[in-house]
Amino acid sequence: MAKRVANEGIGLRWRMRWHRARLTVRRSAVDYFRGDAPDWTGLAVLLLTVPALAVTTVCVPVWCPPSALVLPILTGGLLLRPASLLLLYAASAVALVSESAVLGPYREGPARVTPGTVLVVTAVALTGLIIAQFRARVGVPWRRGHTMLFDLRERIRVQSRLPRLPAGWHAEMALRPAGGQSFSGDFVVATRTSEGRVLEAVLTDVSGKGMDAASRSLLLSGAFGGLLGSLPPHSFLPAANGYLLRQNWDEGFATSVHLVLDLESGDYELLSAGHLPGVQLHAGSGQWEAIAAEGPLLGVYDGAEFLGVKGTLRSGDVLLLFTDGLVETAERDIAEGMDRLIGEADRFVATGFRGSAWRLIEQVAKDVNDDRALLVVCRD
């Protein structure tokens, strides 16, 4: 009995040690690919891989040719710093020379170190070194770079999230970047001001599209998010215009529309900076009306004035704000695109506009190679 208990205790201790070892390896792997682990860990693994491949090549050269050394070299180019990469290259060169000496001249067999093998390994090594030097110049590890891009994308989504509205109101937005990418030149920032009584929302279309406009969109969304609610409504677009002018971008203009909505009365004001007009559904008559405000593009000249247009959202009314990618294509002008958008939006009158933003983009401009954004605000 005592012997069985002792054996169970030993087994339990070994299982606990095995469990701790697995957790340690898992944490180390996660830390490494997040960029938090030291560089020598990956270097040590790859340096051990090189002689392992060399021995395998000497034993079974037909199944593991000398060119297999490109595998650790390519991996090192993606993971290591340039200084560590040179050590890996030195080890690979030694392995290649050793394989050539053991296997003999390349004319004596099919699996030998040929001049072509040396050229392939050298070309891959130079490519990896260029990638590593570029990554070092940027200052972000390859493993960390993907995490940063993912984090930036999620921050943009959080910043574009609309605030919760009181009962009787519904608002939603949808963004669709060009080419199915994760970053867009269109963005929305919104907040509630005046102790929650007023909804302020800004829809902006940065010049360019997709990844070309993503960096400017990211910078502007942060700046506009800081300005919105910190300034009186009529001061927002002039301040945004001044901010763009100070950037001195070669392609630095943008269009923007600023909605200021009183959630108690339904009265609103729309201020535009060269943006397309919005469209409002009047539930009483069932008619759609274009709501166009006047103002120049952002980032064109200093001292620009932006004149607003006022309106009211009554029970059942709907307001749509959108960017040009939704209604304009090479084969279709803006007027025709707006007519098509209104025609598709009419189908939601009977069922309600909840969940309509994404579906409207799918129906109106699904395969358009441009950034598309749609903001829907309706009063129940």
Image: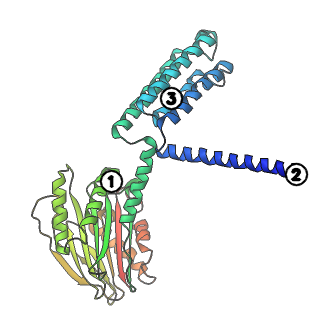
Q: Looking at the picture, does residue 270 appear above or below residue 274?
A: below
Q: Earlier in the sequence, mark 1 or mark 3?
A: 3
Check disc 3 and give the amino acid type.
Answer: Ile
Asked whether the beta carbons under mark 1 and mark 3 sit within 8 Å of each other, the answer is no
Give percent across and percent down for residue 83. 42, 28
Q: Amino acid at mark 1?
A: Ala
Give the side of residue 23 with respect to residue 165, left or right.
right
Residue with the mark numbered 2: 2
Q: Give the structural element (helix, strand or loop) at label 2.
A: helix
> In this view of the protein, which residue sits in the foreground, 71 or 279?
71
Q: What residue is pinned by disc 3?
A: 73
Q: Nearer the viewer, mark 1 or mark 3?
A: 3
How many labels, in total?
Answer: 3
Question: Residue sitting at 41 percent across and 33 percent down?
Answer: 132
Label 1, on which residue? 214
Q: Position of residue 103 (x, y in %)?
A: 63, 13
Which sits earlier in the primary sequence, circle 2 or circle 3? 2
SS category of the residue bearing label 3: helix
Residue lying furthest left in this view? 303
- Residue 377 in view, yes or no: yes
Question: Is label 2 or label 3 in front?
Answer: 2
The image position of residue 202, as x and y in percent, is 28, 69
Indicate which disc residue 246 carries: none
Q: Nearer the viewer, residue 348 or 152?
A: 152
Q: Residue at x 51, y 46 (%)?
A: 31
Q: Are marks 2 and 3 in contact (CB under 8 Å)?
A: no
Q: Tell me: residue 35, above or below residue 209.
A: above
Q: CA distance from mark 1 to mark 2?
A: 70 Å
CA–CA distance in space, label 2 to label 3: 56 Å
